[in-house]
Image (cartoon, coloured by chain):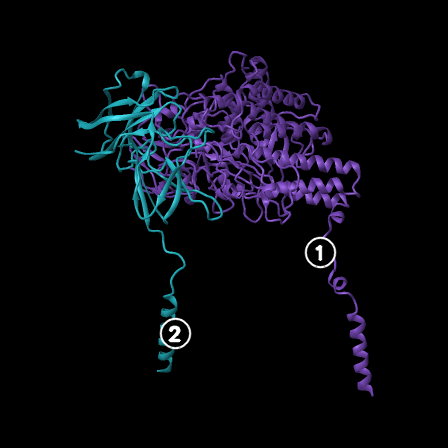
Amino acid sequence: MKKTFSIIFAAALIVTAGCKKDSDFLNVQPTSILTNEQAFSDPAQVLSILADLYNRQLDFSGLDNGWASFADFSESFPSENGSAYFVQRNEWGFGEWGNWDYGYIRDLNLFIERATAAKALSETDRTRFLAEARFLRANFYFELVKRMGGVPLITQSLLYDFSGDPTYLQYPRSKESELYDFVISEAEAIKGNLPVNPNEKSRVTKAAALAMETRAALYAGSIAKYGASTPQVSLPGGEVGIPASMATGYYTKALNAAKELISGSAGTYALYNKKPDLGENFASIFLDKSNNPESIWVEDFKLKSGRVHGFTVSTQPRYGAEEEEGGRINPSLNLVESFEKLDNTYAPIPATDGSGNPIFYTNQSDIFAGRDARLYGTVIVPGSSFKGRPVDIWAGYQLADGSIVTGDDRGAQKTLPGQSAPTQVVGFDGPVSSKEFTAQSGFYLRKYVDPTPGAGSRGTNSEVPFIRYRYAEVLLNAAEAAFELGQPAVAAGYMNPVRARAGLTTPLTATDVSFDRIVHERRVELAFEGHILYDMKRWRLAHVVWDGNKMTVTDLLGNIGTATKRNTQPYGLWPYKLYNPASANNGKWAYKIVLPALVTGANRFRLGNYYSAIDDNVRSNNPKIVKQPNQ
Amino acid sequence: MKYCMYTAIALIITTIASCKKDNYKAPNSKLTGHITYKGDPIEVEYNQVQFELYQYGFGKIGPVAGTFQQDGSYSMLLFNGEYKFIIPNGQGPFKWKQTAAGAPDTTVITLNGSQDLNIEVTPYYMVRNPKITAAGGNILGNFKVEKIITDASAKDVESVSLYLNKTQFVSGADNTAVTTVDAAAITDWNNVQLSVAVPSGQSSVYARIGVKIVGVEDRLFSPVTKLSF
């Protein structure tokens, strides 16, 4: 009886439970995924979606995408065994620097569409979120156009209908000028919707929009103007190349956007000027996170949050480093010598006098004295300090007869002639030829290298932000645009504060400002900030300065400050201590110009490198995409 | 014993099963040739002047890309079939025929077994009668530069160079010594003379003359000459 009852009860249960419709039973909302409406219901939630989009922005050199993105272009020597190819290859591949991340663009478009449609968002929140997303999209298209030229301009999400015919999704490349127009018009459209707040650095502000606009317009203007010198670098459809007639219009826009920012209408920004020592002050622009008036938009990092970077671990001076590594970026003598003397003239670093005899210096850093303070702020030169500790960069002893006593390891010891005990004959920071992490060019990098205790250890890392747009660049953009518009006096007015901050207090006059001056100013002010390639590309100088010919010492020392100066191999400057007890110069320092032994290649920028190759797969999927020129 | 047996059987099965034919034969038709002007080979820089072959009818379209050797030769191992050959715009110190729209025109190649096919192009200039000799510690180059294209698309010479290297690859990127003379300094194009000092310690050199044409990236070269002393 009891058994029968159980069976009936079980059957009844099955029947009742089984009666639910299959579709209802299977259609369960996942508890771990939010619907669009849910996701866009709360501002904090929307911000976290936006944070991911912020995170996926592309930088040429970012502190979190590897030290090597800062090296290259003969501005530095890569002091790491696995990276010698930088100085051993003879050319860049056509695909180098390319990007085709339409997945990101789609996500940005979807964000804009969903945030527009969301019902639960307040108008204030929605306006700001939309403006931010449009900024990110414009900035990313700007990044694409710098690398690829005109790309398909997709401003809405595309959906495939599974009809078997995807041709309606195939968009041709827009003109290069249309991409720049898009960036400029987006900046104009959203600047009013973004907050005016100079203390907001990691989210975009009105100033960021203006900074993007002035840079984009300047790039477009210079491509239009200087593209005329390389007619081969263009496509008949305008996908690559901008007509010269458009140059003035773009330069005007660049100048106006910069003026609007400088006028203070987007908040008060200023050149960073907090420290009395000018070199120290320049280095601090990139380290100071508290109320830095110069940075406009940064990629920020935070200790103990997981969002930190190991840039300092990779590049800190090796001696006394917090890890058994560092010193990977060794700025080249090519760059070091281009820092001006305080009287606004160019001169090589004086290693020898007029008749070729070595000059002896009492202190190691004397040879670099009387130069642009940005040298100290960008480069750690021999005899200077990092974290209050002098770096130990010297290559050996030079004896009376000119012969060299040196060792093959950091801080190696040897017995000098006339002495009985071995003594240290080479610095603990090198330079030792082909020894990684030593200062193989004789210099270390200072810009962005964080002296905070722990920043150089892998377990802690650094929270120094990467500055994407800063005020000094806006001033230089304004100066260049004004110069190109035939207003050299205005240009000088914008350049002089930037130079005065670096100790170059003799102001440039209108007649001093030349194209070479502008090229030079950007090179020294913006070194290791990811500008050099794009600047050389837009001035169509890349194939001239990186022409693939090996550099001689004569090439190195001549024509400093000339825009077309060859720059194909990174040279070094090695300090030697004189050991000659009989001489008055005993213990003083002499310097020798060296080409690091690993440097065997010479940079060659081919015309086909001006615009990175578009992958054959992309072109095969969409036959409307035309190929880049000269590839 | 039994174990041996199993092993033997396994081996036999593997052997038999492995004998099954592959789906495709490896490509075995060789397409070779030179770039020429009226039968004279045109010499270029190693690995810099590209050409592309396209074959249609197999889904995705992508080029089979290659570069010319120093002596202007090329070779490709291909399947039999019909190919379209182009030299992309902006490649080489010569003009490749173009369509009215400005795209590189195609040469149709029908491959049925190996084939030797010279690619005829129109160079801006030709290096004629290059004579490279050693004299003392110097290498002398003596040659004539002949202008081929004289119509509206003619281009001037920018400079001429004499390159030396230790290996047979000689160019602007690969050299141990070079002398470059700007076109303005040359008076007689029928008898151009260049001289370059041999770097110390080299008992033999490979030498080559290069001509840079204004607005053309790839240089025109003479054949590589080996000199020992």
Marks 2 and 1: same chain?
no
Letter of the chain that mark 2 sits on in the rendering: B
Which residue is label 2 attached to? Answer: B10
Q: Quadrant of residue A368?
A: top left
Residue A272, visible in the rendered structure? no
Position of residue A478 in the picture relative to residue B201 (left or right): right
Q: Quadrant of residue A123?
A: top right
- Residue B105 x %, y %: 42, 33
Instruction: Say if B149 sits above or below A331 in the image.
Output: above
Q: Amino acid at mark 2?
A: Ala
- Residue A118 x %, y %: 76, 43
Question: Residue B81 got which mark?
Answer: none
> Number of callouts in the render?
2
Q: Residues within 10 Å of mark 1 (few under 14, many from 20)?
A: few
Q: Colour of chain A?
A: purple
Which residue is label 1 attached to? Answer: A32
Q: Quadrant of residue B46?
A: top left
Residue contact between numbered discs 2 and 1, judged by CB atoms under 8 Å? no
Between the residue at mark 2 and the residue at mark 1, the CA separation in whole angstroms equals 51 Å
- Residue A491 x %, y %: 57, 16
Q: Quadrant of the N terminus of chain A?
A: bottom right
Instruction: Say if A313 sits above or below A347 in the image.
Output: below
Q: Residue at x 76, y 47 (%)?
A: A37
Position of residue A71 in the picture relative to residue B191 (left or right): right
Q: Residues within 10 Å of mark 2 (few under 14, many from 20)?
A: few
- Residue B16 x %, y %: 36, 70
Q: Quadrant of the C terminus of chain A?
A: top left
User: In the depicted view, which residue is nearer to us: B122 or A38?
Assistant: B122
Q: Colour of chain B?
A: cyan
Instruction: Say if A96 sits above or below A2 in the image.
Output: above
Secondary element at tag 1: loop
